[in-house]
Amino acid sequence: MGQRSDLGFSDFKSQMPSLVDIPGEETKILDFWKSHDAFKTSLKHSSGKRRFTFYDGPPFATGLPHYGHLLAGTIKDIVTRYAHQRGHHVERRFGWDCHGLPVEYEVDKELGITGPHDVEKMGVARYNDKCRAIVMRYSSQWEKVTNRLGRWIDFENDYRTMYPWFMESVWWVFKQLYDKGLVYRGLKVMPFSTACSTPLSNFEAGQNYKDVQDPAIIVSFPLDNDPETSMIAWTTTPWTLVSNLALCMHPDKEYVKILDTSKNRKFIMMKAGLTSVYKQENEYKVLDTFKGRSMEGLTYQPPFSYFIHLKKERGAFRILCDTYVTEDVGTGVVHQAPYFGEDDFRVCLRNGIIGKDTPMICPVNPNGRFTDEIKDFAGMYVKDADKLICQNLKKNGRLVHQSTITHSYPFCWRSDTPLIYKAIPTWFIRVEQMIDRLLANNAKCLWVPDFVREGRFANWLRDARDWAVSRNRFWGTPIPIWTSDDMEEVVCVGSIEELKLLSGVEVTDLHKEFVDPITIPSSTGRGVLHRVSEVFDCWFESGSMPYAQIHYPFENTTVFQEGFPADFIAEGIDQTRGWFYTLLVLSTALFDQPPFRNLIVNGIVLAADGQKMSKRAKNYPDPVEVIEKHGADPLRLYLINSPVVRAQNLRFSESGVHEIVKDVFLPWCNALRFLIESSILPYQKITHQLFIVKPDEFPLTNNFMDRWILSFTQSLILFVHEELSGYRLYTVVPRLVKFIDHLVNWYVRMNRKRLKGDVVENQNDWKSALHTLLKVIYQITCLMSPFTPFITEFIYQHIKGYLDYTDNLKDHSSLLPGYSSETGAPDSIHYIQAPEPNLELISNKIEDIVYWMQSTVELGRIIRTRCNLPLKAPLREAIVIHSDPNILKNIKSAQTYIIEELNVRVLTTTSDKHRYGVQLRGVLNHRTLGARLKNDYKSVVNKVKDMSTEELEQFVNTGHIVVCGHELSGDDLSVVYSTGSSSGCSDTQSSTSGLKRKSEQSPSSSSTLDGNSQVNSSKYETASDAKGLLVILDITPDVELENERLARELVNRIQRTRKKAELIPENPIVILAITNLDSYYNIAGPHGNYLNFIQSTIKQPFTIMKQSTMNNINLVDIMQYAKSILPDGWELTTEVIRDTVSIPPDNIDLIIFSRQPIHNSSDHHIKININMNSVEIKKRSVFVNVINYTNHAQTIKVQLCDSNNQWFVHSVDDLLRKVKCAFGWSTNINLQLYTALNTDNKNDLKPFIHVPANQLINLDGITLYASV
């Protein structure tokens, strides 16, 4: 039967249960991969091949993986598996981000640390030990979830940003930048996290904006030269007013002096802001108008006097001018707190109110609390002080207006607390001077999708600021700068060896507690140099990973040079301001090269309600539970077959994962089960031949559907390779998913009988059909293996026993590890290279024919669904209309399949719509056109209403049309077919997409068409598509067709009941149907026209009994009736299932019994003397015994006539069909019956001579021998 699977099952029956437990099978496959060391084995196979370099962005292990991680991990796994499949050596190392705020924040919460003073109190060494202890807290869960997802990546040889060798490479990177003059120390206003007591970079601040409510107040600043007149300024940060040192106006904008009539006070503000401050013009009176520059230099009275001494010392509390002031919001007068605002700092520095060397006016400590300088609010958190500050302003008559505003505000990405802007001495990388080079290097990279590169990322680069890389924290890579106390002598260290040479101290760990005590002697007589206190921003470390992960340049120089830039990276769209940015900045600064060649950007996975996934809100299912419930492959396919791979957002829905299982994986498994259980195993049983084919060979077949699916498969392979060379997963995955539908619901469905051997011309044709399906399943499984590694492994393990890999055994010395030494077969699907397309098998013509065939069938199914007509109900005619004769020719060439699939008697193709009374009318999309066309909309409606069929067909053909001077295209206009006489434009009907057209008919308003195109009543239904195809079905009721429907429905219910009982086709059973209606008995009874159809389909003994003919029906009666159709040598055993099924107009009871051979049945042939005139004969059932000549132990009894003289066999041909059915043989095989010349010598046989039908009774009790 072929090789046995390596997954630990005893036989194929147990491997293919009726319903595949996907999570359970995945667990077995994980064990299989582990026992075979599959990942490492695959790397051994690719050793020595061209390297494909992949950078894995390091996550923090202080939290559990979420859907965003699983999505990015799936994309990375797909691309790297595919690269391996294409002949590359792909090392995949997992990395960990170990330093920075995420770790320190967790430790601070655990230890109750409120600021740097608490760390200094406990000691940096102890604090960092705590960080080191928790940094890998969830690493085991990460590894478990990553492995469970099916991702192959190396955890054993991981990199961690806290490894000393990694940190040393970070030092080297920084030293290179320092030597190039790209590093400087400056005082700048930076986003500052008060929860983490450290500044953040601008791109970090941009990662977490939230809509919040803040106070919005207008404050007065009386002029010194005119105390009755006040400047008024608007602010949303009242806490900064205590540090106010100046006001700023736009020099060229118009300002006004007004009298506030309700307050009777004089104010100065920008003229453009009057409408935002005052609702009515009568609330104020304009006294004067002037330019802002006319006020420059005037002084005023500050709202607080904490720094009033600076009025004389620095010229504070005066009016300044700058063009950054806008008229968009507020009063056009901006209060200046130079150490809490970037523009404030620049303007005040330029005007001498502050200086580079003057003490900072920054009365806020690292925890965001006021210092003792602000005695009224000392110790208060600044945001909490807003309310008290407003009360103080109101008390002192300075609060002009108070309200609240909802606006977007930056929050700390780690602590999720509001940021403030605060001046702090910081080490910077000069990014602004590199902007042109950054843009140029970015243009060299392939971004998927491309719009992110050209839009979001390029725009970010154009506005890039110098990068603040220092953090006032403890757990991180120390900045390797040693300075003199006066900061005049600076030494930057680039390695451990250099530090040893400069200091005489050798270290093995570069963390703060180890290097801070080290001093370097001054070379200029300034004593000793001490290391600066800051550590690196963790983004600087992750941006250095291309070099640090392999300890470049201290080791692996050749490896780095051969693999840089990376071939591929992938992360979420949020990394455009994170990892993507830092990688590009550092690679440009170091080598003037992009850090990667290809990049896939995914969108964000949101909760089902569109909100951000939140552990606190519990608005999403746990990813581990989803995997345990549905499987990893369904989750993978759900994620990558969604808009999220186009950098759009995805609202996660667990039901979507279930749909993938139902619509993709179970049908895929069903196709596999059908191939093995219903096709290959029966073939081997009947032909006594082992079915096995070489994996690289293609079947030799002339069958149309075989040629189509082979062509379709090769076209798919070609498409996948072309698209994946451009990293376009979003085009590939939908095609792969759709292919499964084509394979299962078209090829297998339309070839079921042929694949089962029921309608094949010969055994070679049967084998060709099996070979075709096996080849296609094999190729699609190989092609899909990077996307769904579990299910493809599952399928491969089931089919590899039918694949002949013995060519691999010709040279055992070259047999790769992981290949069977007995069969030559690869142990795993993931050792097999991606299939190459066989271009000779691609036939565009055949694919076109099948495309139009499918379109026709799908439209017919739409009609059936709309009219509630099941496919089992045959119809008289399908009419297909299209204007292109070549398309009609294609459809006509597939009429055999269309007729069968639509279950119609006749297929008619024509381009003559008028013959069938078909009319067209336009339907406008009022939702979009109403707003766009405005006053012209009604004119367009009327014009479309009067459009001719020719004009509408022009729109159908070209996709656009000009109406009343407006061009309509795409979704603007839909064209609707109808078979009635109505016409005109209805803008109330819901419009379909693009050129999509649909029928206006419904079951209650269909029409009868005659040759004169007259429309009468209730006969035809129509449906159409977007490519000009129209299908009309004749739905007229018909008695004969109704009987056929009942027969098909009966077969369907029998098969459902068998499946419900978990029976497989090979299980020997007897099926009994019980009805009280003549209609069922007449079609399925002994003389029914459809009995042969039913028996040939179910391939088991079947009979139907009328309940009305039996009084007090009971199990004994039922079993006696069932026994009457038992083959000779068989007996009933048990009742398997009793089911009541609905087949309108009534219900039918189905009873299935199991049967088994009677031991030594060949010794119990019935010997009866036949007398044609005997009344006794007429009252007995008439049987013949048939022995399988190829297996003498198998004997059946074939009933010719029952005790009521009802004949089941009317000719020898009927007898041959019954014998084939009883043995489970195909009705198309060549069967020969024999009789024995000598009863003592069963081998002395002669062909059975056909007898007249009226003498069939003479066969009662004789023994025949069957041979195929």
Image: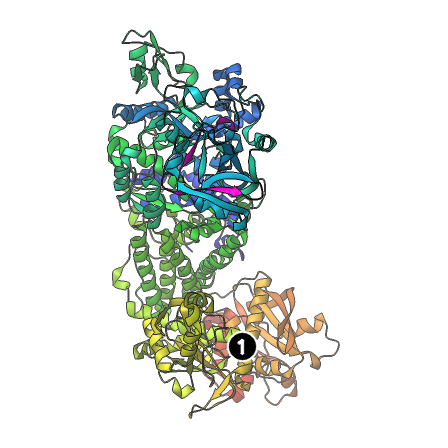
Report which residue position mark 1 lands on.
867
Q: Is residue 244 magenta?
A: yes
Task: Say whether residue 826 is visible.
Answer: no
When asked about the image quadrant of residue 1027, the answer is: bottom left
Observer-nearest of 381 and 662: 381
Q: Position of residue 1030 (x, y in %)?
A: 41, 78
When asked about the image quadrant of residue 1160, the answer is: bottom right
The quadrant in which the C terminus is found is bottom left
Observer-nearest of 904 and 1072: 904
The quadrant in which the N terminus is found is bottom left
Q: Is residue 402 above or below residue 1069?
A: above
Q: Is residue 435 above or below residue 521?
A: below
Q: Position of residue 787 (x, y in %)?
A: 40, 49
Q: Which residues are magenta?
A: 242-263
The residue positioned farthest toward the right in the image shown: 1112
Label 1 SS: loop
When asked about the image quadrant of residue 80, the answer is: top left
